[in-house]
Each structure stands twice: as structure tokens, then as C-alpha cells.
Image: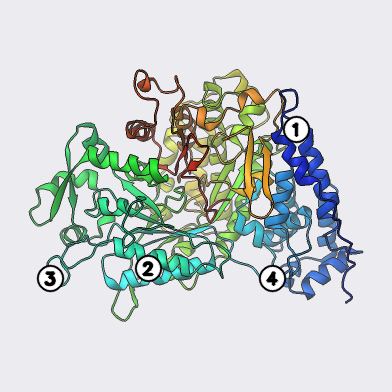
Amino acid sequence: MESPKQVTKSHNITYFELNNELNRPVDGKIPLHKDKEAVRAFFLEHVNPNTVFFYTLDEKLDYLIEHDYIEKEFLDKYDREFVKKLMQKTYEKKFRFKSFMAAFKFYKQYALKTNDNQRYLERFEDRIVFNALYLADGDENLAIDLAEELITQRYQPATPTFLNAGRKRRGEFVSCFLIQATDDMNSIGRTINSALQLSRIGGGVGVALSNIRAAGDPIKKIENASSGVVPVMKLLEDSFSYSNQLGQRNGAGAVYLNVFHPDIVSFLSTKKENADEKIRVKTLSLGLIVPDKFYELVKNDDMMYLFSPYDVERVYGVPFSYVDISKEYDNLVNNAEIKKSKIRARDLENEISKLQQESGYPYIVNIDTANKANAIDGKIIMSNLCSEILQVQVPSVINDAQEYEVLGSDISCNLGSTNIVNLMKSPDFAKSVEVAVRALTYVTDHSSINAVPTIKNGNDNAHTIGLGAMGLHTFFALNQMEYGDEDSIEFTDVYFRTLNYYTLIASSKIAKERNKTFKNFEKSKYFTGEYFDSYINENFEIKSEKVKEIFKNIKVPTSLDWQALKEEVKKNGLYHQNRMAIAPTGSISYVNETSASLHPITRLIEERQEKKTGKTYYPAPYLSNETMKFYKSAYDIDMRRVIDVYASAQKHIDQGMSLTLFMRSDIPEGIYEWKNGRTSKLTTRDLNILRNYAWHKGIKSIYYIRTFTENNDEVGSNACESCSI
């Protein structure tokens, strides 16, 4: 076949200049029309001249297949005429990017390019259709429905899925992984190997280190022989740095440690700016597993005991992570067989806050909160690189021949997100949710990580997905709600209550179709019905007239609906062990023209420093005179209001949420009453209070602490997009 027609490139570039004019107010107003002009110029001056031209759709499809850009196999599941009709139907939607940043991000990060990276082979509509066809797996009706959900931007697959679907040369579709080490060299070696393999495949890797014996614990009865967790952290950091997908991204990993582990202080010290190079970790993220007992000890200003994981496992017969520290604390303290040390609980709390001020780390997982809400048989012991994945795991037993005597289960994250603004306009909310669930189900069904057997085993058994949401602040602004006011909290509650209900309906429907449930469904609170009882007994009704009006065309489940669902699930089961999680949304929220995740925007006009092109500016989505007053920066909002909004969602989300707290290094007067008469500077006390508030409100995890400094820097700003949708 002849090479497709090439179009001469234009050299008259104005789109960056037009976009930059957003930062120059005219008569005190933001010239938003300049961004619209920048989008148009971007297509005329860059996209159109640099897009490979094809005379027909057949020519385009044949070229992409013959030159190894697109897989032939998934297209062959459909009649060619159907494929062309779906493409044509999608083009007819006349999709248009509303902002320069949205178009720029799509074409720079997601669009399929020629091998020399100079020209585009896809429009946005093509990426949509290839995703729909790939994820529908030959089902024409599902492909049509999925293309509709994607082009209207009601549903957005995670970046690895959206980017790779249909490509011949591609990475995996999954976003991230969670693995655990147990307290022996075989497991530690296997964990390092798994980290290498998973980082090579793509996505971030979370690693639980709580089970590893502490520095000074015995090895083969030799006292003080163990070096503890810090050397393992260094090995993991080097592994991630080495296995970084041929330099395409930084190796990304997070390590989690229980606050009652004796190495907790040295663990936190690895992130300090003045840490010795021998122990300092630069690229690893740190997370803490925090049982309820820690909050109690802090409240009472008690000393806290730290327990040897080696002795705890020897006495209890299970790895340290699987012991309920809050429940067993007094028994552990009084057991003479268990080596322990002491630290003042408030001193550790202040160390945590100091480090969060300095670096944004550590993440916090309120592990007892997560397990109390867990409907699945088993124990949650950790989270992932972005703190929203909370699923049960089973430890492995590995012998000296490196064989699994017991094959445990670990976790892969199959993520996607609803766009709240657009989903609320869906003509059929329930159908939209089902289509999203089916798209995610394809990913979990076709994920097979053979290099890491525990990941494969966990995925094969659990079929987990994580459907989330983005655009909450944008929805509030469009509907004239203040972030954190009563209407916004009630809307969030109703939205996630309804989303939860329809994901359960979809999961049960799939289980019935396939006559298959996740492993140990019969041991879950879904099977016993306990999970549904709070909804059935609640007698829920919407109080706010505004929220009632918003949901007037959407069927919000009643207690009778929950009762019927309880019976349906008992009868047919659920296909997915876990269904919902709120991941952070990185660049894809720009493409979706909406605010990221559930948190407030940070600026009315966001400034992005792009590597080769300088600064680009992104106005808050749908910014106008009407929405502007409802778009307050996260840095100027009382974080308790943000926690309140997240808490209203958390009640209905079976996993966790990437909840970022936004602070100023110099806090404006009047936000926090406890600052009155005290210094305006951000202190450890401020973060201590907010973490306790989040725990009291039922928040399962806290992601970064982002601090906006007086010289306009952001400490703790997330540079990793491995788990981002």
C-alpha cells in the first residue's frame, strides 16, 4: 500500500501565545475567549497539518493494521462494515475540546502517533472507537453503548486502558499493584523480583513491609542480627529505578509500615531532607498503617509500645499485619515472650506531621476503619501508591526452592472513572453505570500477570474493579453550591449511594449471566445480607430541595429497592469482590474538561510548566461569571469541609479514596478557629487535628498533604501518575 498523503506543516504558531493571554487580565477580567481561540489555532496550526490523511476508513484501518499500529485480532471480532459505521456515528457527534489544555493533553499523551513520533494517526473519536471495540470484546451492542458513554465523556477508562486499548505495541491495562513481604528471605527475595516485574509491566507498586522483623531482632537465634526494614526499602527503590519501562517513566513504588513496628522512626527518617544518604529514599512513597489504638494513645498522651514482628508472628502464628493490634494491644504489652520498646505516642504523631509538612508524606491508612467497613472475608493490611485501593490479601509461604507451598493473593487495580457532570445528564443513569462496569470487567478478565503468581491468583479469584468519579467541584460550581456546604454534602451522599446501588445491580447481573461469583462470596456480608441492612433500615429521603431537583430524572434507590437487591444478590451472587474506589485523576481530567477527582480546584487559572513548550494555562472547567464565585481554591477552604464531603462519599464506597489535604504554609485568618491568637504559620498541631478529624469522620485513608508555600511552591505535589486515572 502507498504511504498515506502527507500534509505540509505550518510554521505560524500562535496557540501558545493565545493560551498565555489567559494570564493577562483585561479590565480586571480573565479573557477566557482567548483559550477558545487557542484551541482553534492548535488544530489549524498543529493537529490538522500533522495528522496523516486517509481517503477512506478502509484505507486508514488497513494501514494501521499492516504497519503494526493497531491489533488486527480485536477488529476481526466485528464485521468491517460495523466498525466503519461505528466510527462514522462517533464522528457525527462532532466532539469538540472546550479548552486548549484538554486538546493539548490528548494529542501529546494519548493519540496514536507515527513511529517517528512526528505525526498523528488518530483523532479523539478514533481512540474512543478503538477503546469501545476492544473492551466490548466482539459484542456489537456493548461496543455501541460504550462508544456513546466515552464520546459523551460520561465514563473514562484509566490512563493505561485508554492509552493502550487496541494498540499493537502496548503496555498493560492495569494501573497499579499491591504486594506484601513476609518475614523470611525467600519472601523478601520474591518481593524484590515481583517489584522488578511489575514495574517493568507498568503501573505503580505498593509493598507492605510490616511483617518484616525489626532492626535488632534475632536471625537463627543470633541476637541483634536483623537490619530491619530500611535496607529492604533501599533495595526496592533501586529495583524501581532500574525497572522503569526503558526510561519512559520513573519507577514508582510505595512502602507501607504499621505505626506499632519498632522501625517506625527510622522508616520515617528515610524521607527527611537531612537524612544520611545511606538511608535516604528519594523516590519511594511512604505510607503508614494506623490502627485505632494509636489515636487512643495520642488522645490520652500515653506511652505506646512497639512490638517485635518476629515475636508476634511466633506467638500468634500469623504474620504481624494479620494481628488486630487495637484488640490485642494489652495482651501484646503483657506477653513476656514478645520483645517491645516504648515511645511517647504524641512524639510520634508530631514526627508524622513534621514529615508531612516537609515532604507531603506519609500517607495514612486508618486500617481498623477500613476493616470494620469491609464486607469481604479476610483482612485488609495495606493500600497502593495512591491510597484508594483497600482489598483483602492472603500471605504466601515460599520454600527454599522458591516454590509456593501456599500461594497467597495480592492485588491489581483495574480503574475507571465516572465524570459526574456528564453522568448526571445521562438519559439512563443505570445503563451508563452498567456499561462502565462491563468495560472494567473486560480489563480484570483479561489481566493475567504470570510473572507474579500472587497477583494473578488474586485477580483470578476476586475480579475486582475500581469505578470512581471526577468533576465533583465542577458539578458544585455549575449548580451554585459552595464546596462543603449542606447541599454539596447531601449531593455527594446521594450520588455515591446511587452509584453504589447500580454497580451492585450490574455485578449481580454479570454473576447471573456467567453463573460465577468471586471466590468466598458465601463468606461475605453480601451473601449474609448484613451489608444491605443499614440501607434497608435507614428510610432515606433527600432533604434539600435543590438536590431533589437535581435527581428528579434519576431513580435513587429506596429501602424497598435495597431489600429487593439484597434478595437478588443472595440468589445470583456478585461477580466482583470490590467495585468502587476514588483514584486521583491526573492529565485525563483535563481531557474530560472537569475538576480532578473529588477535591476542590487549586487555582482559577492553573499554570502548568510543560517540558519543551514553557507555560500553559488551564481555566477552571466551565469558568464563567456564574461559576467563578463557587470556585474557591482548595488552599483557601477549611479542610474539614473537604473531609466532610469525602466522608459522605466514603459511606458508599467499598474501597478507599485518594483524599489530599491542601494547606498553606501561612494560613489565612479565620479558616481554623484553633489558630485564633496563635501563629498563622502551619504547625504540626494543625495536621494532627485534621488527621484526627478525618479518622472521627470515618475516612479510611489520607493521600498527600500538599502545602502551598509563601514563594508559590507546592510541597507534596504529586508527580506520579502511575495510579492516576
Q: Is residue 373 left or right of residue 167?
A: left
- Using the image as rendered, state which of residue 335 and residue 679 is in the foreground: 679
Are the residues at dot 2 and dot 3 in contact (C-beta closer than 8 Å)? no
User: Do callouts 3 and 4 mark residues in contact (Cβ within 8 Å)?
Assistant: no
Residue at x 36%, y 67% (from the top left corner): 235
First reached walking from the N terminus: tag 1 or tag 2: 1
Q: Is residue 8 left or right of residue 201?
A: right
Quote the CA–CA distance across marks 2 and 3. 24 Å
On the image, numbered disc 1 is attached to which residue? 32
Disc with the residue nearer the chain's start (2 vs 3): 2
Image coordinates for residue 332, horizontal then vertical, percent: 15, 49
Q: Tell me which label, 1 or 4, sits earlier in the chain.
A: 1
Q: Earlier in the sequence, mark 1 or mark 3?
A: 1
- Quarter of the image with the N terminus is bottom right
Q: Is residue 18 left or right of residue 220?
A: right
Q: Nearer the viewer, mark 1 or mark 3?
A: 1
Reading the image, the residue beneath label 3 is: 222
* Cα distance between the residues tagged 1 and 4: 40 Å
Residue 543 appears at what percent x and percent y? Answer: 54, 20
Mark 4 residue element: loop
Residue pointed to by mark 4: 168
Q: Amino acid at mark 1?
A: Leu
Residue shown at the point (24%, 55%) measured from the top left: 263
Specify the label residue 191 is tagged with: 2
Depth-wise, is mark 3 or mark 4 nearer the camera? 3
Is there CB contact under 8 Å for labels 4 and 2?
A: no
